[in-house]
Image (tube, rainbow, N blue to C red):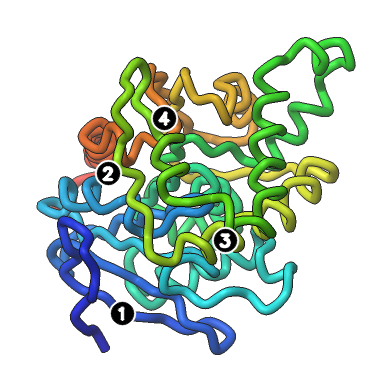
Amino acid sequence: MTEKLDTTDTPRPDRTWTVQRKGADIAVLEWGDPGAEPLVLVHGLTDTHRVWTTVAALLADGFRVIAYDVRGHGGSAPARELLGYRLDQLAEDFFTVIDAASPERPVHTCGHGWGAVQLWEAVCDPRATTRFASFTALSGPNLDHFGLWLRALTPRARRGFAGLDRWWSAAHGVLALGPMARRFYSPRLRSLLALRPGNVVPVPARIARTWRTDLIAGARIVQANLVHHLGKPRVRRTAVPVQLLVDTTDPFVPAAVYTVSARWVDQVWRHAVPADHWLPVTEPLLVAETIANFIDDLRADHAAITPRSG
């Protein structure tokens, strides 16, 4: 059952509802025509669906836009154990949402940061062939592909790859901050981290009232997955069309990390843009246009190869 959303977010979602997995609620929000082609947006660490609100509003004229709060974030219940934050469990949350929202129709998807990391896990699942229509990744690599890439580097190359050191430092910084979140990681600090390049004015970081528990959940996701997947990477493949939107000035995810995924993705498109890590907030029009154009191109390609009846 849907209910009125109590939030100060602008623009507001058109509908909000919950879906249960293992007895815990996952908060789901929608924009646009319920009969339109479904597009699912997944947020990253310490965020909630709020990071997508402007992008969702821009896309709502052409899609049924669906976002949800990742386990432990926003209005979604936390996992009881650390293993509940493993990528395979977060991917099951995603499949639970789309099975409830669009049981018969495959969905287009876009993930930001660790939201993209979660979708990489889902898009390499055998179910993805029939449940995904497309996947756009923003600022989030496939951890297994990343781990395989690291193994292929020589020790000298690893030492010389400065961007990797920044990525590791940032990831473990989130992990270290987790227990101290209530005292030190304030919304003001988060906003300062989301500065536009060359601009001293903070970009609104769309912080939810649940920011303390959001940070704790984000830290647990890092703790449950980073070392586990990078230490024992799996060969993961997908036939789903994948678009990589690579922000070349991202201080957290070096652009070179994405290169290796082309080896295990049948159809991949890559677009480089000189933008920062928080693209859904700092460049929502760019993100919305990139997703919509990719889907339009896929529709055109499908129409060109589909035999006409009669």
Q: Disc 3, disc 4: CB below 8 Å?
A: no
Is label 1 or label 2 in front? 1
Mark 2 packing: few (<14 Cα in 10 Å), some, or many (20+)? few
Secondary structure at badge 3 equals: helix
The residue at which mark 3 appears reads as: 182
Secondary structure at badge 2 equals: loop
Is label 3 or label 2 in front? 3
Is label 4 or label 1 in front? 1
Q: Disc 1, disc 2: CB below 8 Å?
A: no
The image shows a total of numbered marks equal to: 4
Residue occupying image coordinates x 18% and y 48%: 59
The residue at which mark 2 appears reads as: 306
Could you tell me the amino acid type at mark 1? Trp
Q: CA distance from mark 3 to mark 2?
A: 55 Å
N-terminal of the pair, mark 4 or mark 1, is: 1
Could you tell me the amino acid type at mark 3? Arg
**For residue 104, side relative to residue 46 (left or right):** left
**For residue 159, side relative to residue 281 (left or right):** right
Could you tell me the amino acid type at mark 2? Thr
Q: CA distance from mark 1 to mark 3?
A: 28 Å
**272 to 25, vertically: above or below:** above
The residue at which mark 4 appears reads as: 245
Q: CA distance from mark 3 to mark 4?
A: 33 Å
**For residue 247, side relative to residue 203 (left or right):** right
Counting from the top left corner in percent of width and height, residue 73 is at 49, 65
